[in-house]
C-alpha cells in the first residue's frame, strides 16, 4: 500500500465519521500524518502534496470556528480532487 493510499484512509476516517466534539483532535491527527509523511507523498505525487498543503490551511482555519461543517465540505472537495488526480 502506498503512502498516498494511507493518507486517503486517514482523510476518510474523518470524512465518514459522525461529527463530534473530538473533530478537532481528529483533524489535528490528520494534519500530523500529512506533515510526517509529506516527503513520500510528494515523491508519489507533487499535486497531491500541494493539495495536502491546502488541506492544512483549512485545518488551521478550524481553530477559529465552533462549527466545522464548512471545513469538512472543503476537505471533502480537496479529497475528491486528490482521488481524481491519483487515478490518472
Image (cartoon, rainbow, N blue to C red):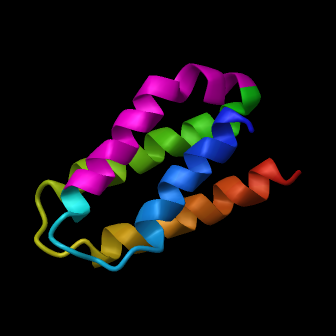
| 26 drawn magenta | yes
Q: Is residue 74 visible?
A: no
Residue found 24% across the figure and 64% down from its top: 23
Quadrant containing the N terminus in the rendered view: top right
Image side of residue 36 versus residue 68, left or right: right
Place of residue 2 in the rendered image (x, y in percent of width and height, measured from the top left)? 73, 35
Residue found 57% across the figure and 44% down from its top: 7
Taking 13 as reference, is 88 above or below it? above
Viewer-side residue, 76 vs 1: 1
Taking 64 as reference, is 18 above or below it? below
Image side of residue 71 versus residue 48, left or right: left
Place of residue 11 in the rendered image (x, y in percent of width and height, measured from the top left)? 50, 56
Residue found 15% across the figure and 70% down from its top: 21
Viewer-side residue, 5 vs 44: 5
Image side of residue 78 versus residue 66, left or right: right
- Residue at the farthest right position: 88
Residue found 22% across the figure and 52% down from its top: 25
Q: Is residue 5 visible?
A: yes
How many marks are shown on the rendered structure? 0
Taking 22 as reference, is 29 above or below it? above
Image side of residue 17 versus residue 25, left or right: right
Place of residue 81 in the rendered image (x, y in percent of width and height, measured from the top left)? 66, 60
Place of residue 63 in the rendered image (x, y in percent of width and height, measured from the top left)? 14, 54
Q: Main secondary structure of the magenta part?
A: helix
Q: Where does the magenta region start and end?
A: 25-43
Viewer-side residue, 1 vs 14: 1
Amino acid at each position: 500500500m502506498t503512502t498516498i493510499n494511507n493518507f486517503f484512509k486517514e482523510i476518510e476516517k474523518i470524512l465518514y465519521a459522525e461529527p463530534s466534539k473530538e473533530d478537532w483532535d481528529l483533524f489535528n491527527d490528520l494534519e500530523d500524518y500529512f506533515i510526517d509523511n509529506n516527503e513520500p507523498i510528494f515523491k508519489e505525487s507533487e499535486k497531491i502534496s500541494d493539495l495536502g498543503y491546502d488541506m492544512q490551511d483549512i485545518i488551521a482555519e478550524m481553530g477559529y470556528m465552533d462549527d466545522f461543517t464548512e471545513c469538512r465540505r472543503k476537505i471533502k472537495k480537496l479529497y475528491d480532487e486528490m482521488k481524481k488526480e491519483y487515478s490518472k
